[in-house]
Image (spheres, helix red, strand yellow):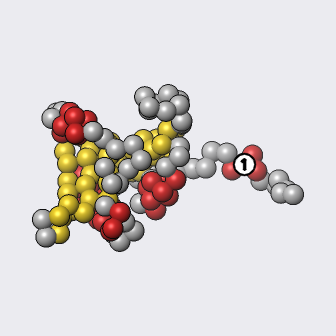
Amino acid sequence: QLCFEFPWSADDLRDALTQRHVIGSLVEKDDVVLGFLIYRYSEKELELLNLGVMPCVQRKGVGRKLIQHLVDFQAKRRKRRAFAVIRETNLDAQLFMKEMGFRATETLLDHFPDTPELAYVMERPIGGEGVQKREWVNRIAHLFQGAKHE
């Protein structure tokens, strides 16, 4: 509840964690949960469903540790990409995911039932044997070449 503007309810959390192929991970210190990650995996990819870090330890590497452990762990299992859906207004999450190697690849309309705001699909390739890393391309940069800003 402390981590989010729009937190999951206890029912949301229970429903997610009882689904097939959904896993949760924690970072704890002295029996206190500092952060958590919930994700769904399939044969070739994984979807980050929720990531939360207690406000008292935000920007201290907890979220980075969770994501890096997940990516390293799943790379060994030949997953090719990880993705997350991030609210348009959640700039902190967008910047964090960008820092972790994720890039916005798609915009979704009407994704969230509680708000009309847009959602961004952010994804990153996951390395592994025989998996080629995707080359990220800015698809609109050519529109601004030579443009002058006034």
Nearer-the-camera pick, 78 or 97: 97
The quarter of the displayed image where residue 71 is located: bottom left
Q: Quadrant of the C terminus?
A: bottom right
Q: Residue at x 44, y 31 (%)?
A: 114
Label 1 neighbourhood size at 10 Å, few (<14), some (14-19), many (20+)?
few
**Residue on which disc 1 sits:** 142
Percent x, y for residue 4?
38, 50
Percent x, y for residue 58?
37, 66
Q: Residue at x 26, y 44 (%)?
A: 39
How many numbered dots are placed on residues in this image? Answer: 1
Left or right, residue 149 beside residue 63: right
Q: In this view, does 47 lie above or below 144?
A: above
Nearer-the-camera pick, 88 or 108: 88
Amino acid type, residue under disc 1 in the picture: His
Q: Residue at x 53, y 43 (%)?
A: 88
Q: In this view, does 110 lie above or below 85?
A: above
Percent x, y for residue 145?
77, 53
Nearer-the-camera pick, 131 or 43: 43
Q: Name the outermost residue toward the left.
A: 31
Left or right, residue 147 beside residue 94: right
Report whether residue 101 is seen: no
Numbered disc 1: secondary structure: helix
Percent x, y for residue 127?
33, 55
Report whether residue 133 is seen: yes
